[in-house]
Image: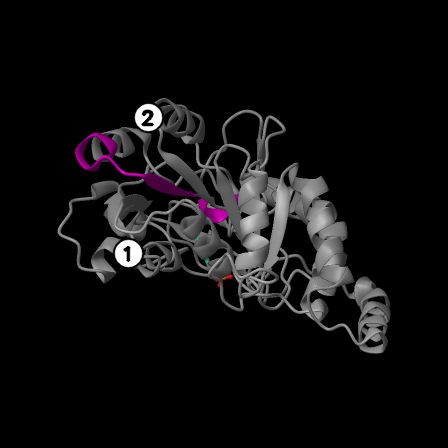
Amino acid sequence: MKEMKFSIGFDKRDLPKLHNYWNKIIESQKWTESYFTALFEKKWNIYNNLHSVAFGSWSGGALAAMRYFQLVGQTVLCPSNTFMATPLAIVNSGAKVQFVDCNKTDLCMSYDDFKIKAEKYHPAAVWVVHIGGHIAFDIEKIAEYCKKNNIILLEDCAHAHGASWNGKRPGEWGDAGVYSFYPTKTISTGEGGMLVSIHKELIEFAKRFRNYGKPDYKVSGLNLRISEFSAAIGVVEVDRLSEIVEYKNEYAQKLDSKFKNRLILPKGMISGYYKYIVFEEIEKSTGKVYDNPCHRIMKHDVDLPNTDWVAKNHWCVPIYYNK
Ligand SMILES: Cc1ncc(COP(=O)(O)O)c(C=O)c1O
């Protein structure tokens, strides 16, 4: 297999357009909270079918959602097979984290273990993480349980740009979803995040939360804004997203004939292929999605056998957009 160097998913054909946008920003004298932030949000709203608020990172969107749902002192369930960002957002917003096991098939939260933990801890909320660019296979069952039992469902969509399941996009199952535009992601703005939700009041809260509660200071926020320069990259990137995902899907199809022992998607699911995951050791790999589960890093005394198995037994084949 041809070795592929890591490559940010930015199409060089977009450079003149981006330079033109940046010139406009410089001339406008409006370098934050202006035209391109609003345009990025509008485009994401159309792509994702949900109200959208842009942030300077995933963290900003996650904190806004957790603050809005008033989770201080409450228990929030979280998969252990995720980046430390997810449990750290929980503890830094004043809530308590309890870890849930994953499935070996999709590396995402297991419904069976979620149900056990929900009955044991009576959580106020749960974070489901769509690991690797596909949608968590158990999302429908988890969403249904949350609805019946009044549990807030939050989706960590940091990996899931471009994914869908029978036309439904990440963030559409839950009360809120949050994307990351960190440079390794399928599309990036350098630093950035996007909070999506069906709840209009959450969106209004989040816009104030990212900006110190302006204009009336009724919301106790901080500076979690995205700059206009980053938002302009976002505008260019949303327009390229479907092409990038198509390219990755075609590339994945070629890899499918080579790797039999791989993650298999259910019918109707399209992955954004943030990662191409196999369950065999391979010669050229970008390594693991995560090597060290969060419950081990945070020293939680809980037995999560599938999470430990996954940490040892999966590898990622390079799959980068390179145009
Ligand atoms: C699953 C997951 N959640 C959250 C984040 C945090 O995103 P950010 O760096 O934009 O805050 C990441 C980032 O790498 C991630 O992989």
Residue 117, by quadrant, is top left
- 46 with respect to 192 (left or right): right
Q: Residues within 10 Å of mark 2 (few under 14, many from 20)?
A: few
Number of numbered labels in the structure image: 2
- 177 with respect to 115 (left or right): right
- 262 with respect to 112 (left or right): right
- Is residue 232 placed above or below 43 in the rendered structure? below
In depth, the one of 251 and 72 nearer the eye is 72
Q: Is residue 297 magenta?
A: no
**SS at mark 1 in the image:** helix
Where residue 201 sits: x, y (%)? 55, 42
Where residue 119 sits: x, y (%)? 21, 30
Kind of residue at badge 1? Cys
**SS at mark 2 in the image:** loop
Where residue 44 sits: x, y (%)? 68, 47
> Of tags 2 and 1, which is closer to the observer?
2
